[in-house]
Structures are given as structure tokens and as C-alpha cells.
């Protein structure tokens, strides 16, 4: 999936932080937040702006969960897989979501509408299992309701 | 200072690691991810040794010798039953990761493992993720390749999965790899490695290829070498030196003769 | 307002206290992680709407306070009317009007919103009288649920920054370290290392720069204590760090917050900004010689970055790969400088230790584990939430008194502590003391404070598999025993849950575990096999049931169970639609049938059946 990216936008985001190697992760997070992924242009620009080797920036981009090198969907469906949610049936919720969207956790639907992710504990353990679609929290989720939650996005 | 290894005392120097002493004294301890050209990493854990000290009240510990700094009167045991079992288990695991790598098979057999107890990795390459190639590339100053990803699926890779722009074709990674799993090809005056092609510079006299143009340019620039440093290969350079030396001898002889 | 002397701080505090006393009622709306997820924002918005409309004399929006986690997350959204302590649970926007009319204006309590004790079935008016709260001792969590984290005046009124005054004006760094050492405070992140000793060692290192880092990475799934403190009482963390920096000789400090906690970052930024504006942080704090800058460093999303050396690499902008710690980070840490790294909760305790003395802290808890510990009590208990208890309390008191016992009439099976590095303890350990050393001896560990209660519907093999998968995903991959070993251990655990394993496989798992523990580079690998080792130690019969009998006693492992409808079925048709694969057939008033060939064991029918007509065999 190729998405067009304005390099000037990238440069502007990079310019907001001090141009020091210790700000690499923070800058990549700003870029991720803005574009919903890390475009190749951004990785190259960050490397040159910070004086960090390109291979190092790429290593950091592929090490941390926060970063995605593929464009993410318009909506994000997150299934909490924390311990409390797990023992209250989170894996079944995940299975159902995967079935409904036709993708596996970590992937995005071909029409770029949904990205499905798993997260480890959002601190809402009392309402386990928890599903978060965009900013909306659904607690005590029942497997059969997932279809409806996704349609509501 | 002195440290004791397997009952004998050896000289050691401040700032050294235990493995440095082991290597110097030719005491055999396996260490796949350590190499004198690069900083130690601690990935393979094969160089594990048991340490103790008269001041430690009987406490013993297992540490990786590549990363443990020497201290005065340290006592090291390189092969205990537990450590041997550990090495065996590590090789068992590595054999599952790289079932086709001859170097791993050989080392594993030395420790009594011929077949792995685990499910071998399907379509396995020979990379044990020791990081020597990426570390030496960094040491050379190129940082062309790095370890990409995290955990079981991590790999040695190139930025954005494309041909690395910073590679100079120097072959340091090829030479340092313990399982020889980095491939390159020299055909005529073209070198192919990491999906890149480099122009090989031939010796102006004998025509043998010496080095890539990129690597040569980089060395000339970084180390302030004369522009024509790589015009001749080492053999031809030696010939020249030998000729000049023999000219000097002849001239000396002539001088002696004239004196007489 | 610039506080450039301790006197000015005292005057400010007096003004804040006067303001507080003048207010008639305070309506606390809990904005803790649990309540945020169950809809407190809408409840607060309703208060704002109605109060704006009504324009009452004594009560304005200023009387409604957003606080950090009050504690009883299970019953959220929580609304507390202070100073009485009237405690309303499961509050919805529709209830707000009545709360204002009946309780605030007319002083009447709304019965149906009160907490119902599961043991006596009686409604309890004030939270002080609920067992969940009665049995707690809140030190690190002292301000949570009582102050507005974004309002520095609330913190000042609660005594905030008085410890900094004491330290900067009357104690030498060595005396500060002495007080912390006397208190016996051990690291609350899980390691349990004596804080005073750590600070002393760091101070002694001869170097130009010393650093202080607060570990806010809280990666254990099921743990949200640190999140609650960072979001609900950020100034307590700052104050603890200032005191530590003074003791150790640091000019710059960092709070490392995991990427998944954007709200914590927000509240911390606000607290730092406010503190700097008042001269309580930055150059010449309170007009003294001591200066400190605190920076927030955001993680990129990696559990392994909770490990100290990996965390420091991450602060420096690198991948979070741990290193061998033969040279400790107190000697060579962040950018190779001597660094003190302590957990959020550890720092939150420090101001109280300075204010009330190390001896006071030592008098709580037991000799080898002094003070209190915060836990996130979750899982199959009645009262899930955030608690803080004195060390030495038993698991039974926590789970059955504070937690209110096992939910839905099921039986207790195990309690998991210490996150993925910890273990599961069975019924025989219920009267065990909760302290660092007892838990470790039993095969688990204190960890950061996640405490997950499991009942008879849990499969312990599945729990081990779950934690192993987590660790395989989160391992940095640097060393062989952890990367390859945990991967293989997980594969074998999956094999067991699928009923395909042999007893040889189990023996291999035990052997492999031994060497993962010996050979791994960092704590993640070294303690990685714990979930397996503790469950195989106490629940070996379950492993053998999976291996020998191909059965799952907990009714969880899908390959080994079947869902069957029994004759309690009333033919109500309720389970037919929810089935995602249309495996259930049946007519009205006739017993339904599940087609085993289609059934995916998803549990949807079991969840919806009101008549106990579905068995998991």
C-alpha cells in the first residue's frame, strides 16, 4: 500500500524537537501520530536531521510496538489481552474480531478502513474483557456483540 | 594482577575481560558471538564460566566471560557439569534454529548433540543472530546493516529492506560471520553483495582486483591516504619494496667497493 | 506565584487550607483508569451541564473535583460526596440530577446507588465503612481519589512539598539517605532492592554527572498502580524525585513513561509545568542552591524496557536491548553515568518517609519488608480495584476481606502475582504473608503489584501458555536462551493445551526451563519460565490430565472440551442468534442441540444462558 507523503510536513514535525539522537523515539512517535504510520521518507529525513545512521533509525522503528511501517486504517479496533481480560475470555473476542474483519491482529483491512491490534492491559480490568474501538471503550464484551460494535464505528 | 583459571594462575590486565585472558592463554572456551575486532555482545552465552573469589564467602556465580571484567585473585572454572549442560542446551537450541549450518553441527556434536530435541525452524538460513556482522559494520563506520525487529523473528537486515546505501562492499561482515552465511559474488570487476553492485578496482600492474571503488575512496578520505594508494595491489607493492631494497643493497656494496 | 522561600510555601498552604474549609461540599468524580473506561467523562459532563443550568449558590462546577483512582474500580463510575464520604457506585449520567437534588441540596442518600456488601447484603453509606477500604493503609496512594492531579494547590493543601522544604533546609544528602535507609524502603517495582543502599552507592561514585530516573514503564499486564499514581498524584512522584536527586547529586532527572499511557504523560507535563512556574522545580528550588530539571521520556512500546539497562538505552533513543549487569547501572547507567533508577511507587513513598520519619515507615509492615504495597486486585473477585495494604497481610485477607471473595459463587483456585516474571500460588498459600521474601520462596514474586485472582474455571496450563506467549512477543531477542528457549518452551506449552504432548515433552520443558534461568542475560529471560515452573509445581495434575487423559479440568483448552446442552434447557431460543457459526438448532420449548462439527468453543452461548443448561466437558 503506497501513500503519498509531503516531505515538508515530515520536516516540520522533525523540527519541533531538538535535533539530538536522544529524541529519536519521540520524533518517530510524532510522525506516527500524524501519518498513522512511518513513511519511508520520514525514516530517511529523521536519520539525516539527527545525524543517526539510517540503519539505526530503521532498527528503532522495527523494535517498538508503537511504530508501524505500513499505513494504518481509519479506525482502530484494540482488543485488550491483559491477564484479567485473558481469563475472562479475551482470546475469543479476538477470534471473533479477526473473523469479522478478515484480517489477523496487527494487520489492516485492504480498504484501509480498520486496523486490528492487541494491547496489553489498559487498566480497565474491572470491565474485562475490554475492546476499544477508536476512543470508545466496550466492557464486559460478549463475543456476539463484536460485529455490532465494529459496524458502529 | 593475577587470576586463577582451572586451578592455574595467569597474568591479567586492568580493563580486560576474562575471555581476553582465556584467548591469550589458549584455553578453549566456545564463544560464537565474540571477536577481538568488536565489543562483546553476550548473545550466544557459550562462553559462560563459573567464578568465585576468596572474599566472597563461598559464593559462586555463572557469568559470560566475554563481558566480565577481570579482578585481582578472581577464580574461574571454564567447564563445570552445569556449564557443560548449559552449553549443550544452547547448542541444542541453535541446532533447531540453524539445522543446516555445518559449524553449528560440528560444535554441537562436540557437546554431544547430534539431533535437536526441538522442532527445527522451517526454511532455515544459517544466521545465529550473533550480531558480529552488524557490529563490525558499525566499527568500520558504515552502519550499512543492522538487526531489524525484535524477538524470535528478528533478522540481520538492510534499512527499509532496500539495498543499503551506506555499504561499501568491504566484506568485513562476510569475513567475521561464524557460520559463513553472508554471501557475495565477485565476477570480473563487479562485486555483488546485499543487493548492491560495486566496481572492483584492479591493480594497475598485474590486473588482480584489490578493493571496491567505494571502500577505497572512503579509506583514502577517512585515513588521509594518498590518492594513488590503491593503484597497486599488496603483492606488486611488495615487489617494488623488494626491488628498492635490493637496489639499496647494490648501492651500499658499490659504496663499499669505491671506499676500498 | 513564585515560591522563593519555605515561608512563602507555608503561607500558600495556609491560604489553600482556608479555601478548602470554606467550601461546603466537594463532589468527587473518580477519573481513574477503570472509571474512565466505564464512562466517568459523561457523568462529569452531566454535572457541568446541570450546575451551569441551575446556578446554585453553594455548589458550582468548582465543587466538582476530578480525581485519580479512588480504588473500587469494579463499581465505577464512582462519585463520592465529601466531607461525609457518601459513596455512590455505578453512577450514570441519568443519576446526576437526583444526586444534586436529593443528596447535595436535601441531604438525602440515594439507596440504590450505594455499595451492597456481598456478605451481608446490606447497603453501606460511607466508603470508610466498606471492608474494601477499611482494611487498607494508603501511603503511596494517599492522595488518590482526594485531590485534583492538575491542581497544584490541592497538593500543597494536602501537605505537598513540605518534605522538600525539610530536606533542602535542614538535612544533608547523607542524612536523607540515612532516613530512607532506616525506613527499610525496598524497590516497589518488583526487585525489592533497598532504596537507601542504592542511593548511597550512587552518591559515592566519583563522576561529574549523576542521574535519577523514575521507571514508569509498568509493563505487567493487569497492573495499573503506577499509571494511577502518575495520573492521580503526579506531584508526589516529582517530590520523591527531587529528594532523591538532592541525596544523590543529580542535576537532571527523567521519568520514563510507557507509550501506552498518554494520559499519564499529560498529567506529568502539567505537574512539571506548574512546579516550575512556582519555583518548586528548575533553577534554585525555593530560593536554595539546589536546582533540578525533570524531563519526561516516552517509551516506544516494549515490555523489556521496564528492565533498567534497556530503559536507559531507550531514554538515549536506542533499541531497548538490556546489557549484562556485571557493572551495575548505579555505577555506569544512563550515558554511562551513575544513575539511580526507582519505580513510581517507590518515589511516591519518599515524601511521607521524610515527613514522618524512617522509624514511622519501619513500624508498618514486617521487619524484612517494611511499609505498604499497592496492588491492582483483579480477576475473579467481587471487588476488583486499586488497593494498598501493609506488608505482612495475608493473601486470604486481601482476596476474601478486601476483595470480597470469589465472584459468581465459584471456588478459589490460584492467585497470580509478579506479572510474567511471577507465579501462581494455590489455596495452601492463602495464609501466606504478602512480603518480598515469602512470595519469592513460594515460587512467585512480589513484582510491581499485579494480583490476579483465578477460580475453578481457569486452566493453569493455559495461564502458563498465555504468559509464555507474552514473553516470546516481548523478548528483545538478543540472547539465545531467552529468544530460542522461551519460543520452544511456548511451543511445547501449546502442544500440551492441544492434548498432543507426551510426558517426555514435559520433562524437556522442565530441563529447558532450568537452563533458560541459568543462561539468560536479563531478568525477562531469567524469570521467564516462572509461570510454567510455578504452575507445574502446584498444579502438576492439570498438566498430566492434558497429557495423559487429553482433558482440560478448567474447561478452557478448546481442543479438549465440548460444549453440550443438558436437560435444564427450556427452549428459550436465546443462544441461537449469538452463535457466530450457527451451530445451535432448536425450536421453542424444545431442548436445543449444538452441532459439535461446527462449534468453535467460543463461549457465546454459555455466557448468555440463564438456566445453567450448557455444560463444558
Image: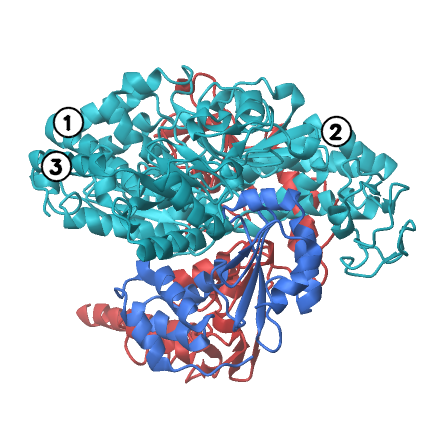
Of the numbered discs 1 and 3, the one sitting upstream in the chain is 3
Front in this rendered view, residue A111 or B192:
A111
User: How many residues crowd around disc 2 within 10 Å: few (fewer than 14), some, or many (20 or more)?
Assistant: some
Q: Which residue is mark 1?
A: C172
Structural distance between the alpha carbons of marks 2 and 1: 55 Å
Q: Hue of chain B? A: red
Residue C366 seen from this side: yes
Q: Secondary structure at mark 3?
A: helix
Q: How many marks?
A: 3
Quarter location, residue B154:
bottom right
The chain holding disc 3 is C
Of the numbered discs 2 and 3, the one sitting upstream in the chain is 3
Q: Where residue C310 appears, x then y in whole percent?
A: 42, 47
Which residue shows up at 44% across the image and 55% down it?
Answer: C42
Q: Which residue is mark 2?
A: C540
Horizontally, is A31 left or right of C57 in the view? right
Front in this rendered view, residue C227 or A49:
C227
* Quadrant, the N terminus of chain B: top left
Q: Where residue A97 appears, x then y in whole percent?
A: 66, 62
Q: Where residue A9 appears, x then y in whole percent?
A: 34, 78
Q: Which residue is mark 3?
A: C9
Of the numbered discs 2 and 1, the one sitting upstream in the chain is 1
User: How many residues crowd around disc 3 within 10 Å: few (fewer than 14), some, or many (20 or more)?
Assistant: many
Structural distance between the alpha carbons of marks 2 and 3: 60 Å
Q: Is residue B4 above or below residue C564?
A: above
Q: Where residue A45 appears, x then y in whole percent?
A: 36, 75
Supply the letter of whichever chain is cyan: C
Task: Please identify, in this view, whether the residue under mark 2 or under mark 3 is nearer the observer.
Answer: 3
Asked if marks 1 and 3 fall on the same chain, the answer is yes
Q: Secondary structure at mark 1?
A: loop
Horizontally, is B73 left or right of B88 in the view? left
Residue B47 seen from this side: no
Amino acid at each position: 500500500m503506497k501513500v503519498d507523503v509531503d516531505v515538508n510536513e515530515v520536516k516540520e514535525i522533525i523540527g519541533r524537537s531538538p535535533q539530538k539522537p536522544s529524541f529519536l523515539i519521540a520524533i518517530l512517535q510524532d510522525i506516527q501520530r500524524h501519518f498513522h504510520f512511518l513513511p519511508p521518507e520520514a525514516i530517511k529525513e529523521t536519520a539525516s536531521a539527527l545525524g543517526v545512521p539510517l540503519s539505526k533509525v530503521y532498527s528503532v522503528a522495527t523494535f517498538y510496538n508503537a511504530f508501524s511501517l505500513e499505513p494504518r486504517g481509519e479506525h482502530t479496533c484494540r482488543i485488550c489481552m491483559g491477564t484479567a481480560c485473558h481469563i475472562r475470555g479475551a482470546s475469543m473476542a479476538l477470534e471473533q474480531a479477526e473473523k469479522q474483519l478478515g484480517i489477523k491482529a496487527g494487520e489492516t483491512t485492504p480498504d484501509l478502513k480498520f486496523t486490528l491490534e492487541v494491547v496489553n492491559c489498559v487498566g480497565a480490568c474491572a470491565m474485562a474483557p475490554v475492546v476499544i474501538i477508536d476512543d470508545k471503550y466496550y466492557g464486559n464484551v460478549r463475543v456476539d456483540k463484536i460485529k455490532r460494535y465494529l459496524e458502529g464505528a | 594482577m593475577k587470576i586463577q583459571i582451572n586451578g592455574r594462575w595467569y597474568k591479567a590486565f586492568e580493563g580486560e575481560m576474562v575471555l581476553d585472558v582465556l584467548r591469550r592463554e589458549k584455553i578453549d572456551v566456545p564463544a560464537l558471538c565474540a571477536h577481538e575486532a568488536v565489543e562483546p555482545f553476550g548473545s550466544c552465552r557459550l562462553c559462560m564460566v563459573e567464578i568465585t573469589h576468596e572474599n566472597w564467602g563461598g559464593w559462586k556465580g555463572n557469568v559470560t566471560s566475554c563481558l566480565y571484567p577481570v579482578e585481582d585473585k578472581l577464580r574461574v572454572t571454564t567447564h563445570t557439569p552445569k556449564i557443560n549442560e548449559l552449553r549443550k542446551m544452547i547448542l541444542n537450541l541453535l541446532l533447531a534454529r540453524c539445522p543446516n549450518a555445518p559449524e553449528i553441527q560440528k560444535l554441537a556434536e562436540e557437546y554431544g548433540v547430534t539431533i535437536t530435541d526441538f522442532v527445527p525452524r522451517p526454511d532455515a538460513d544459517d544466521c545465529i543472530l550473533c550480531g558480529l556482522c552488524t557490529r563490525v559494520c558499525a566499527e568500520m563506520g558504515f552502519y550499512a546493516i543492522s538487526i531489524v525487529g525484535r524477538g524470535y523473528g528478528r533478522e540481520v537486515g538492510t534499512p527499509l529492506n532496500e539495498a543499503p546505501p551506506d555499504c561499501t562492499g568491504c566484506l568485513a561482515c562476510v569475513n567475521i560471520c561464524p557460520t559463513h552465511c553472508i554471501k557475495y559474488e565477485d565476477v570480473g570487476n563487479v562485486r555483488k553483495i546485499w543487493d548492491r553492485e560495486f566496481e572492483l578496482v584492479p591493480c594497475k600492474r598485474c590486473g588482480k582486483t584489490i578493493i571496491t571503488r567505494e571502500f577505497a575512496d572512503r579509506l583514502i578520505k577517512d585515513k588521509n591516504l594518498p590518492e594513488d594508494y590503491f593503484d597497486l595491489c599488496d603483492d606488486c607493492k611488495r615487489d617494488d619494496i623488494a626491488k628498492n631494497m635490493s637496489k639499496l643493497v647494490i648501492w651500499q656494496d658499490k659504496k663499499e667497493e669505491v671506499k676500498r | 506565584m513564585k515560591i522563593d522561600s519555605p515561608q512563602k510555601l507555608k503561607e500558600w498552604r495556609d491560604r489553600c487550607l482556608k479555601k478548602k474549609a470554606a467550601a461546603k461540599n466537594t463532589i468527587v468524580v473518580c477519573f481513574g483508569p477503570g472509571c474512565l473506561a466505564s464512562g466517568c467523562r459523561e457523568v462529569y459532563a452531566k454535572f457541568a451541564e446541570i450546575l451551569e443550568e441551575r446556578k446554585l449558590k453553594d455548589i458550582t462546577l468548582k465543587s466538582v473535583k476530578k480525581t485519580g483512582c479512588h480504588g473500587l474500580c469494579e463499581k465505577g463510575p464512582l462519585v463520592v460526596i465529601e466531607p461525609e464520604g457518601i459513596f455512590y457506585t455505578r453512577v450514570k449520567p441519568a443519576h446526576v440530577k437526583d444526586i444534586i437534588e436529593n443528596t447535595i441540596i436535601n441531604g438525602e442518600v440515594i439507596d440504590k446507588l450505594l455499595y451492597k456488601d456481598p456478605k451481608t447484603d446490606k447497603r453501606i453509606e460511607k466508603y470508610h465503612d466498606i471492608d474494601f477500604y477499611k482494611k487498607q493503609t494508603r501511603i503511596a496512594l494517599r492522595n488518590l481519589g482526594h485531590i485534583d492531579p492538575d491542581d497544584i494547590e490541592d497538593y500543597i493543601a494536602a501537605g505537598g512539598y513540605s518534605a522538600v522544604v525539610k530536606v533542602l533546609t535542614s538535612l544533608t544528602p547523607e542524612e536523607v539517605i540515612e532516613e530512607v535507609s532506616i525506613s527499610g524502603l525496598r524497590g516497589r517495582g518488583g526487585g525489592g532492592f533497598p532504596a537507601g543502599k542504592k542511593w548511597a552507592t550512587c552518591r559515592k561514585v566519583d563522576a561529574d554527572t549523576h542521574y535519577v530516573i523514575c521507571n514508569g514503564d509498568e509493563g505487567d499486564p493487569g497492573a495499573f498502580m503506577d499509571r494511577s499514581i502518575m495520573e492521580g498524584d503526579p506531584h508526589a512522584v516529582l517530590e520523591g524525585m527531587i529528594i532523591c536527586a538532592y541525596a544523590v547529586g543529580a542535576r537532571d532527572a527523567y521519568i520514563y513513561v510507557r507509550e501506552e499511557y498518554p494520559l499519564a504523560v499529560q498529567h506529568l507535563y502539567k505537574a512539571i509545568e506548574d512546579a516550575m512556574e512556582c519555583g518548586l522545580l528548575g533553577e534554585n528550588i525555593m530560593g536554595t542552591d539546589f536546582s533540578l530539571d525533570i524531563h519526561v521520556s516516552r517509551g516506544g512500546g516494549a515490555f523489556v524496557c521496564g528492565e533498567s539497562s534497556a530503559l536507559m538505552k531507550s531514554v538515549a533513543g536506542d533499541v531497548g536491548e538490556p546489557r549484562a549487569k556485571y557493572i551495575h547501572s548505579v555505577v555506569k547507567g544512563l550515558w554511562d553515568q551513575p544513575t539511580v533508577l526507582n519505580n513510581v511507587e517507590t518515589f511516591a513513598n519518599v515524601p511521607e518517609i521524610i515527613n514522618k520519619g524512617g522509624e514511622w515507615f519501619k513500624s508498618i509492615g514486617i521487619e524484612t519488608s517494611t511499609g505498604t504495597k499497592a496492588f491492582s486486585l483483579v480477576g475473579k473477585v467481587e471487588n476488583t480495584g486499586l488497593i494498598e495494604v501493609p506488608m505482612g497481610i495475608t493473601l486470604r485477607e486481601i482476596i476474601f476481606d478486601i476483595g470480597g471473595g470469589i465472584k459468581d459463587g465459584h471456588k478459589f483456585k490460584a492467585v497470580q502475582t509478579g506479572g510474567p516474571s511471577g507465579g501462581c500460588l494455590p489455596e495452601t498459600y492463602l495464609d501466606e504473608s504478602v512480603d518480598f521474601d515469602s512470595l519469592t520462596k513460594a515460587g512467585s514474586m512480589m513484582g510491581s503489584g499485579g494480583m490476579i485472582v483465578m477460580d475453578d474455571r481457569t486452566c493453569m496450563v493455559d495461564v502458563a501458555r498465555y504468559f509464555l506467549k507474552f514473553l516470546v512477543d516481548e523478548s528483545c531477542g538478543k540472547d539465545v536462551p531467552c529468544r530460542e528457549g522461551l519460543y520452544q518452551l511456548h511451543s511445547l506449552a501449546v502442544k500440551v493445551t492441544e492434548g498432543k504432548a507426551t510426558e517426555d515433552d514435559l520433562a524437556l520443558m522442565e530441563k529447558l526451563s532450568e537452563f533458560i534461568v541459568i543462561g539468560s542475560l536479563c531478568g525477562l529471560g531469567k524469570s521467564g519460565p516462572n509461570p510454567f515452573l510455578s504452575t507445574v509445581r502446584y498444579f502438576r495434575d492439570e498438566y498430566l490430565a492434558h497429557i495423559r487423559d487429553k482433558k482440560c479440568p478448567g474447561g478452557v483448552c478448546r481442543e479438549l472440551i465440548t460444549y453440550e446442552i443438558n436437560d435444564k434447557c427450556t427452549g428459550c431460543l436465546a443462544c441461537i442468534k449469538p452463535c457466530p457459526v450457527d451451530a445451535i438448532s432448536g425450536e421453542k420449548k424444545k431442548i436445543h442441540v449444538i452441532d459439535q462439527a461446527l462449534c468453535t468453543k467460543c463461549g457465546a452461548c454459555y455466557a448468555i444462558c440463564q438456566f445453567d443448561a450448557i455444560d463444558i466437558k
